[in-house]
Every structure is written in structure tokens, then in C-alpha cells.
Amino acid sequence: MNMGWAEENQRYGAACLRRVLAFLGAGTSAAVDGLDQELRELAAAMERPPAIVTLREAFGLSGFEQDLLMLCAGLELDDSVRSALAEGRGGDAHHGAPTFGLALATIPGGHWSALTPASPLRRWRLVEVAPGPLLTETPLSVSERVLHYLAGVHYIDETTGLRPIETVPELPGGQAAIAREAAACIAGAERGRLPALQFAARRREAGHGVAAATAAALGLKAALLRPDEIPSAGADRQALARRIEREAVLAGLLPALDCTGAEAEALRSAGRLADEIAGPVILLATHPIELLRSDVRFAIPLATPGERHAAWRGALGPGNEHLESDTRRVAEFFDLDSEAIRATAGEYAARSTGQQGEGGPLLWELARGRARPRLDHLTERVEASATWDQLVLPDAQAQLVREIAVHARWRGRVYREWAFAGRGAAGLGISALFSGPSGTGKSMTAEVIAGELGLDLYRIDLSRVVSKYIGETEKNLGSVFDEAEGASVILLFDEADALFGKRSEVKDSHDRYANLEVSYLLQRMEAYDGLAILTTNQRSALDPAFLRRIRFAVQFPFPDAPARAEVWRRIFPPEAPTESLDFERLSRLNLAGGNIRNMALNAAFHAAAAGTPIGMNHILLAARAEYAKLERPLPEAEVRGWT
């Protein structure tokens, strides 16, 4: 009858315990020889080695150390071992617990080094040594984690903080090749000289995927540990390293320290832990970490749009060939990994009704939501409701705005398909500066572009980003760009002169760091694979070097009377009831579009309260309130005859 591994492992362990009992005086040498033969036969019949054999080979245990470990485990697993120990020790205060002195006296091949702190039994906490004055008389016990392993019960020791990656994603070609190469580095290394693997990934998910694939190629499972869970004290960190090494063997894990986005001190702590771990370990970080041990470094590439497109086609399956152009565009704009693509395809299949023309917009919306970055702590997502019909600009400025949208929409074709990106990565980011007086439509224009492209618009919250502490503003903005990468979101920096003002003469360290900060942000904007829009009321306050590196600069003029009349015509939705509005008269009020919008909205509320259509009398009430807010007198000559 065929038995499972658990039952075979139990039989093997029972034979090992009978062998230990023979050493304690309950059997003869002939019995020991017979048990040795039985153990060989049992091991040969098993599909995979028994637990104690795996431990012996993984930790380099001697025969004496293996028997001593089984003696300690037998105290927990077998009553006959407990009885034999109690009889052999004469019922002393230790209640029959095994000691090192007893093992040396009864188990063949005994050696003193088996219980030194550097021995496998103690280095990896396979046995625990109780405190006592005499080492040879100190009670020994098996570690609970090891005991369960020997009994065939598998779990992860939660004290390590390791969290396994349960699934191995289907990686794009470039990432899969790195996983194979990384696995080969570990498989081909000599025992005791295993390298640390450093994966520099721009996106956390990419690093996780390559780590999981690397482990799978070695027959292991990747397990993540955050640097904030690493103890700062050296002794505690060393103890954690030993537990991680032990768990790597017991649970078949490849530890991966996930340092993506970690602070400098956390990176140093992760580096110290990696140096302590004798076995293979992976470090995931945006940039390499300096180590004392040997390491091999890999830069993890993002999936190409072509690889993402192939993943979309596979995830959507047959019957969705009509989405070919839509999936190509989605793959170009949203950097989703294979797991996210499969999840989005499943959501699409569940929500699609099959109506003509629905597929492309629905797929785009689902992919955009899946790729949406975690930026709530530094930004505000703006619902892009404004349309081209609401935008009133001179022809030259309107043409520039449309050109910005064209560049953002077709950057994939120009940069990648037509290989313009291969001529140099500098300056490939699309940046635009909107300058002009307050209320002239700069922010609304950003909404129009976002709506035209079907992309999310995020307004940078300067109160959270700008810091008086050296380096903090740079770090915050770097976090914004890091999170926005791959989601093609439009970043809107309102009042950009607060961030990109003219560089000052260097008089102290603060001036030097401020200037370095501006240079860093310029580099990030140029490298950002998306559209960044900056607005300012004072273009002259910006650094000229910064202006030279902006691709588009749009000057928003204060609207003249004809432009104001056009704004008034377009400001009321078709659903809003109006009556006898004189747009020429309204345009005489010398106000910007933002003020006009405020007055139109307030007038609508006055009309709603009165139960009548919006008329000139309601706008007059709103105008008086708006001018009072601006602390300016309402020109009575301009509003005479409105009511």
C-alpha cells in the first residue's frame, strides 16, 4: 500500500527514536545495526527525504548532532524516550530532560564542539540550552519550530516577519531573463559563498515578481521582509538573521528584504541584516545598497508596451479581437503587471454587456482605475469635467493647448515605434507652463487636456510637499514622481513659482540645497513618462534655466470684452434655465473667467431659491457679492439698466 510523505516521515522518525533508545540502554548493538538498515530502506523508498535528513544536510549536522537532536525531540514525541531518560537520570530535578553530558556518555561519535555557540545546533536554534552553572548538566530541549518540522507539520515562523509571495506572476521577457540569471548565480555558487542579489526596480510590483520567479526557479518560495521590522540592536538583528536562515531551510524560502521607498536608516539596517545572513538573500530597492558580503546587482526593466499588449491579448482571450487597437493604447499608457492585467480582464468580462462601442471605453476606465497611483497623502485628484467648449482662449494659445494634448497622446508612437527615444532620453518628458493672471483658465485648461486624453489629473498639494527642512521637499516630490510613473497621470503644480523660483546666490548650506533641489526636480520632470503642467501668476518669478527646459509655455491673457462675452455665453449649462441675459452688457464687468464662473453659479442659486429662470437681476446680486469679496467697488455705470 502506498503511503504519503507525512506517514513515511513519521515511520522514519519512529525508527530514529528507537535507535536513540538503543543508545540509552534499551537495545543491543545488533538492534542498532538492524535499525540502521531499516532507516536506509525507508529513506530509499521515500519520494523526498525525511525531515531529519533534510535538516542534517541543510545545516551540516554530524551523526552525533543528528542523534542528539532526535533525543531532544523524542522527549516530546515518545513516552518511551521520556521514561528511559527519567530512569537513566534517576528522577533528578530536571525530570528526565536530556543533557549534553548524557549524550556524550551514551551516543557514539560524541564531540564537545557540538554544543559550542557556533555549532549548527545552537547557531540556528535547533536546540535550546537552559541557563545553568554547568554546561554538561544543563537541560536541553528542541526548538518548537524544529519539533513541528520533524513531525511533518509545516508553517512559517511568524517571529521572522517573513511573508511569502504565494503566486509567481507571468513575467515579461526582460524580467523573466533576469530571474533566470539570478537563480543561476545562486545555484552555481559554492556553499558558504552564496551572493546577495540586489534588484533595482522602479516599481515595487516588478521587484516582487522577479524575486518570486527567481525563488521558483530554485524550487523555493520568495518571502518578503520590510526593513522597519528589522531590530536596530546588533544582537537582536543577529538573532533574527539566524531565525531567517533556519526558516529558509524549514519552509523552503528565499528571503527578500523589500526596501522599496525606504529611508536611508532603514536601508542601512537592511544592509546590515543581509550581511548577517549566511544564505542567499534578495534586496529590493530603487538603488543598490552597499554590503560587506559579495553581491550581484540587476536593474529590473519595466515591461515594454509590446509585452503588456501581448499580456492583454492573452488575458482577454478569444472573442475580443475587436479590442485590438484599444488594448494597444491601454498597454501604451498604463504599466500594469501580468497579474493586474488578468484581474482587469476578468473585471471587464464581468461588467461588459456586449453593447456596440462599449468595450474600448470600459476597458480604458478599468485599466486607468487599476493603475491609479497612491498619491492621496501629497496630492488631490481632480475630476476633469471641463470640456473644449468651455475653454475661451485666443487662437494661438488654443492651438498650443491642442498641441500639448497631441504630444501626450502620441508619445508612444513617436518615442518607441519611431525610435526617437533611442536618440537620447533627455528631454523626453512632456512639460508645460501655464502663466497668466488668476482666474484666466489655467487650471481649467489642465482639466480639459485630462478629459481629452482620458487620464487622471492630480493637483500637487504644496502645503504638504514644500518643507522648510533641507531635502524634505525634494524627497516629497520624488515620491510623487515615483508613484505617478506607469500610470500616465497628469501632474498639476499650481503656483509653481513656490517650487521653481529663481535660484539664489549661495550664501549658506540652505541656499546650496535649494539650488540642488531645483536641478533635481528639473531632471525628474524631463524623465517623467507623462505630462507635467505648472501654473504661475508671475512668470518672471521663475528660474530662467527652468523655463528653457519647459517644452510648452502658454501665456493666458486677461480676457478682453469680446472674450468675456464668450465666457458668459458658455458658462451656463444647456440644462440651466435662463431668461433675457445680455452677454454684451455682462462683458463690461472687467473680471476674469474664474470670477465670471463664481457669479454665474451664485446667480443660479438665487434663481433656484426664487423659483425662476436665471436673469440679469440674479447676476446683479451675485456681482455685488463677488466685488465685495474682491474688496472693489461695483461700477454702477456698468450695471445700470440690468433690472
Image: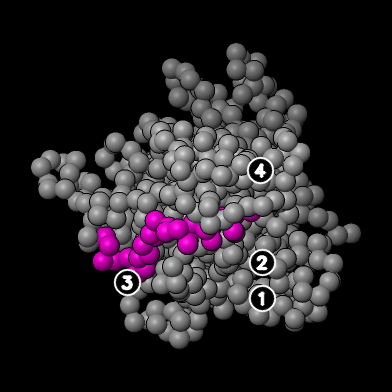
Percent coordinates x, y for residue 298 in the rendering: 41, 65
Q: Residue 364 has which mark?
A: 2
Disc 4 to disc 2, C-alpha distance: 35 Å
Q: Can residue 115 be seen by looking at this rendering?
A: no
Residue kind at label 2, given as amino acid type: Trp
Residue drawn at (81%, 66%), measured in percent from left and top? 352
* Looking at the image, residue 407 lies above or below residue 72: below
Of labels 3 and 4, the one closer to you: 4
Per the image, the residue denoted by label 4 is: 604
Which quadrant of the figure contains the N terminus? Answer: bottom right
- In magenta, the rendered stretch is 546-572
Q: Residue 326 has which mark?
A: 1
Residue 88 falls in image quadrant: top right
Disc 3 to disc 4, C-alpha distance: 49 Å
CA neighbours of label 2 inside 10 A, class few (<14), some (14 to 19), many (20+) = many
* Looking at the image, residue 642 lies above or below residue 409: above
CA neighbours of label 1 inside 10 A, class few (<14), some (14 to 19), many (20+) = some
Q: Earlier in the sequence, mark 3 or mark 2?
A: 2
Secondary structure under tag 1 reads: helix
